[in-house]
Amino acid sequence: MFKTGSFESLSAPVVKSLNVSVRNRELIGVDLFAGAGGFSLAANNVGINIVAAVELNSKACETYAYNSLKLGKPTLYEKNLLSLSPDVLKANHFSDGKGCDILLGGPPCQGFSVHRIKDAGVDDPRNKLLLRYFEYVKHLQAKVFLMENVPGLLWPRHKPFLDALYRQGKKAGYQLHKPIVIDARDYGVPQRRKRVFVLGVRKDIKLDIVWPPQPTHGDAKACSANANLLPWSPASTVFSKPLSSVDENNRHMNHSQELIDVFKKTPINGGSRKDSGRILPCHGKHDGHTDVYGRIDPSEPGPTMTTACINPSKGRFVHPTEPHGITLRHAARFQTFPEDFIFKGGLIAAGVQIGNAVPVLLGEALLKAISDSLVYCEGI
């Protein structure tokens, strides 16, 4: 048994296949809670055919549908997962005997967010979606599933949900690796972004896999110790390329003249609100969050792109040198989306979609490790 905080995992050692055979068909997958399509895009980029995606938010669906060709043209279900039966997906996409190879998805994480205080989120109805996700895994008999969520999922107050997930996994015949916290900057993403991933493998599937995959990037100390590592990608990579005037995501918030003046006084390349001299009445009682209204430091990996990443009042989201917040395109670059991936639904809705997405480069690194192991998995 492994221990993660107060949570007990049902993980076991990785087993190598004894009689391997090369896969002679493409891998087929399903993306639940698909959002704008970050996980789907990563899957498609490493050769996994996502045949179906489920997402409830209409504006995220608009984005997903607009970029459908880049995502491999999956069937998109604009449905609530609690009301959509997994029988529908099974009948529409797996009736020919081909099984689901990999099931993806990150159940809405607000109930588990580190920004929730005290016992907020314990009874959040969205947390039921965590268990509903596994009902799909079980019903579609996916060979592998990969679930993503925020680190707050591992807090002791949410232990009942993870315990239930792991109990159901064992009962249904799945081997669940212990939850791992992965920082996206360790895989080339230019931001500090920690998320929890849970990998599950059907017990009749034997994988030769290193999980999680070895990081490709690291800090200066790690790079000096390992010549194969590249330095973390700094935020400067996001701002070094000019923005296109015809890009509809080249938009930032409209700020008041007062805020624009504050940003002009904020030192470039990492200056904070306090450096600008802006003092609010509330700061007489406490100094506030130091990152709020702060500029991004281009020499370091950027801050975590949250659902409010285009709003400087919510974090260090001011342009490194200009007197305004970052644009949607900047935020999308932090999440390693390609330039021609367009987010729909308006400024605020697009920012939410970007903040909720799995960074494409991170998704590729994780899914390639899984895909490569399934290539040499007996019976695939």
Image (cartoon, rainbow, N blue to C red):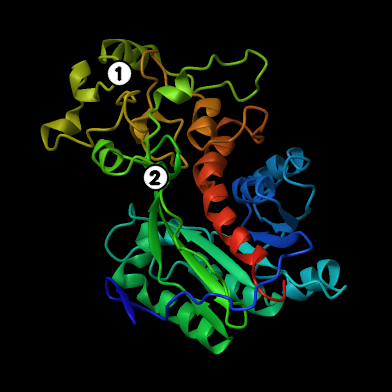
**Image spot of residue 359 (x, y percent):** 52, 44
The C terminus - image quarter: bottom right
The quarter of the picture where residue 4 lies is: bottom left
Q: Residues within 10 Å of mark 1 (few under 14, many from 20)?
A: some
Please indicate whether residue 180 sits to the left or right of residue 352 in the image: left
The quarter of the picture where residue 297 lies is: top left
The N terminus - image quarter: bottom left
Vertical placement of residue 189 versus 261, above or below: below
Q: Residue at x 79, y 73 (%)?
A: 90
Q: Residues within 10 Å of mark 2 (few under 14, many from 20)?
A: many
Is residue 326 in view? no
Vertical placement of residue 135 versus 27, above or below: below
**Image spot of residue 193 (x, y percent):** 39, 45
Most extreme residue toward the left is 284
Is residue 68 in view? yes
Please indicate whether residue 368 sits to the left or right of residue 334 in the image: right
Q: Which residue is mark 1?
A: 269
Q: Residue at x 26, y 43 (%)?
A: 225
Q: Residue at x 64, y 66 (%)?
A: 374
Residue nearer the viewer, 124 or 49:
49
Which residue type carries mark 1? Asn
- Separation of marks 2 and 1 at Cα, in angstroms: 23 Å
Q: Residue at x 67, y 15 (%)?
A: 246
**Image spot of residue 338 (x, y percent):** 62, 32
Q: Secondary structure at mark 2?
A: helix
Task: Name the N-terminal-most of marks 2 and 1.
Answer: 2
Which residue type carries mark 2? Asp
